[in-house]
Structure formats: structure tokens, C-alpha cells
Amino acid sequence: MIRFLDLQAVYRQDQSAYDAAYRRVMDSGRWILGPELEAFEAEFAAFGGRRHAIGVGNGLDALALALQVAGIGPGDEVLVPAHTFIASWLAVRLVGAVPRPVEPAPGLYNIDAAGVEAALTSRTRAVMPVHLYGAPADPAAIRRLCEERGLLLLEDAAQAHGTRHRGEPTGGFGRLAAYSFYPGKNLGAFGDAGAVVTDDDALAAALRNRRNYGSAVRYQHDSEGVNSRLDELQAAFLRVRLARLPAHNELRCAQAARYAVRLAAAPDLALPAIPEGDEPVWHLFVVRHPRRDALREALAAQGIETLIHYPKPVYRFPPFAQHATAGRSASDELCDEVLSLPIGPHLGLDEIDRVADAVSAFCEGRPR
Ligand SMILES: *Cc1c(COP(=O)(O)O)cnc(C)c1O
């Protein structure tokens, strides 16, 4: 059996460090807004080269709170990828704004600056590129465009902990960037958690305020806040996992490189393109095949787990159907062909080779 994800294996690899973090918090008697969160926020801000990281309850809240403190609301339009996890769109709706889809760039999974420019309208106030699968979404060019047009740039970096573009970390291009620490992400907690990063002192203060009932001083309320805090236990676990993140990301890069070599000649299989200057962290390794469902079944029959990220563009789901483009779109085509192969710190290169052999055999029409 080759598992797609195995978080118990990730826990066991560093069990004594996680167990020590657990003990430290249980002995401290501090559960919410304490020293572990402060330390994690400082460490995560430093990791991405930003002044502030503000821990929140999850990635969706990170996106919505970031939009809210930046003043995006009803009547505003936010450009989002058609091909992404639904949270990117839901965050826009949570602040009462309108999501407007951008189709993926030709040959890529991500949107690019040309696609953003083509989708702009007079009501566009913000652009939310998603660094999907851990690959940068043309952030330097999109930043230039946003600066020229006076638009807010908010990066959805939920799949891109440690990604770089032309040597610069993603999550540092926008005025704000939002992260998820959902367990399966490259940097994951053992529960729900998220963060917003920014260099802007005023936005950081507003985020700290909003996440905690609009309160900086107990029982004094300055804004209409919410309850969205990253708790002490999760912060302590995240500190352990953050220390391992560079090694885990390197491992993912080695696994992706191995897939690329072993699958280079597989007929009808499209491998992920890596534009010049991009340094993905391979949250997912996504291939395309015209007979994707048959490939997936053949792999499952050999005990190899795969997933589909994502089965439909967001506007094909009922809550967003009114935003659908007429006819068959680029993201419709992508969604019918994408398949995510196993990758991550629970796997060795020998297992990557076994997956690659099974994929090659299917593509070449060889029985197994
Ligand atoms: C995981 C994810 C989110 C949401 O994160 P949660 O912590 O699950 O709320 C948002 N955007 C993208 C692209 C994601 O992959």
C-alpha cells in the first residue's frame, strides 16, 4: 500500500519533539494567546522574511480577515482562479465581495498576469492569486500589475510554505498573504490553524484585534471582531514542524525530480511545467492524462492511492454557478485530466519509483 498522505508517520518521525511540545503546553496551563503562539508567529514571520505573522483559526479565516482589514467589502470585485480550492472563493463571499474567475494560463495549472489583466473590470479592487500545488502563480508580474492599477494583492499561500520565485519567497509579494496549516499541508498542525503575514504594522494590529473579538485589552472592543485564534497546543506542534519544513520540502523536491526523470517518456502523460525562476515546494505532484480515471483505477488496483485536485472548477459548484463561463473552459479541461500522485515526507524514493513504474506501464499499455 502506498498512502497518499500519512500524518501518523510524520508524527512518529519526530515523536519525542511533538510529545515534549505537548508536555510543555500542558504544564504551562496556557491554552489561548500565550507564549507558544508568540514564538511561532515570530519564527514563521522570519521564515518568510516578513515583519508580522498573525495566527488565526484556519486558512479560510486568514483569507477573509486579510480581505476585511484591507477594506474589501460589498460592491468590490476580487479576481480569483477558477481552478482552486473553494476556500479562496468563500473568503471573498464572507466579506460580501464578488469573486470573478481567472482561467489558468496555457500549459500551467496557475493563473498569470495576462489572465488577470484580461479579467479586470471597473469594479475590481483586489487580486488573489493562489500558488496552487506549491508552485508560484506569476507573482512578480501580478505585483507589478496591481501596483500600476492600485489593486490590493492578497496571496493565497495555503499550499506554498517555502515556495520561491526568482529567489524571493512567495507570501512576500502581496501586501498580505494567507496561510493554512491544515494537517495535510507542507506545514500542517494536528488540527485546524492558519496565519496572515504582512509587513504593514497597522494591518497587523487590525488583524490581532479582529481575530480576538475586536479586543486588544480584555473586555474593551474596538472593532466588530470574530473568534479565530491559533491555540497554544497547535502553535507548539507547528514550531516543531516548522523546524523540519526545509528538510521536508527538500525531500519533496527530490521526489518530484525523480518523478520527472522516470516519467519523462511516458506516452500521453503531461508532467507539471516549471517556468524559469520558479522554485515550487511540491505540496502536490499533479500530472495530466486523457484517460485519467482509468489511470487512477489501475493505480488503485496496485495499492497506490491518488487524489484529484480538483474535480471541477469552483464555478461548477451550485453556490457559484452564476459565475460560470459559458461553454467548456480551460479549467474544465484541466479538471477532467489532473491526477495527484503520492508525494511527501512519509515516502521514500523507492516508493516514488514504484508509483512511476505503475504509471509508465499504464501509459505504455503494458499489463501489470
Ligand atoms: C487548504 C486551503 C485553504 C483553506 O485552508 P483551511 O485551513 O482548510 O481553512 C485555502 N486555500 C487553499 C488554496 C487551500 O489549499
Image: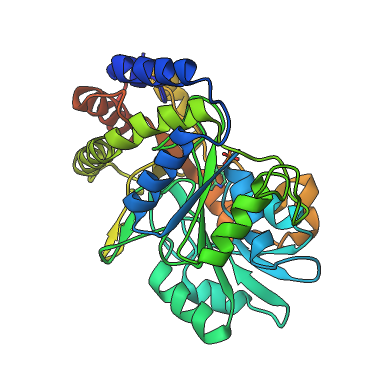
Residue lying at 57% horizontally and 66% vertically, measured from the top left: 202
Relative vertical location of residue 289 with respect to residue 178 in this rendering, above or below:
above
Dividing the picture into quadrants, the one containing residue 246 is top left
**Residue 337: x %, y % from top left:** 49, 44
- 199 to the left or right of 282: right
Q: For ligand 1, which image quadrant applies?
A: top right
Which quadrant of the figure contains the C terminus? top left
Residue lying at 65% horizontally and 52% vertically, measured from the top left: 209
Say which of 234 and 214 sits in front: 214
Residue lying at 52% horizontally and 62% vertically, measured from the top left: 176
Is residue 58 visible in this depiction of the protein?
yes
Is residue 184 visible in this depiction of the protein?
no
Relative vertical location of residue 160 with respect to residue 75 in this rendering, above or below:
above
Which quadrant of the figure contains the N terminus? top left
Say which of 74 and 221 sits in front: 221
Relative vertical location of residue 360 with respect to residue 29 in this rendering, above or below:
below
**Residue 21: x %, y % from top left:** 38, 21
Image mark count: 0
Say which of 27 and 163 sits in front: 27
**Residue 48: x %, y % from top left:** 35, 54
- 254 to the left or right of 176: left
Say which of 235 and 85 sits in front: 235
- 271 to the left or right of 193: left
Residue lying at 65% horizontally and 50% vertically, measured from the top left: 216
Colour style of the rendered protein structure: rainbow
**Residue 138: x %, y % from top left:** 41, 67
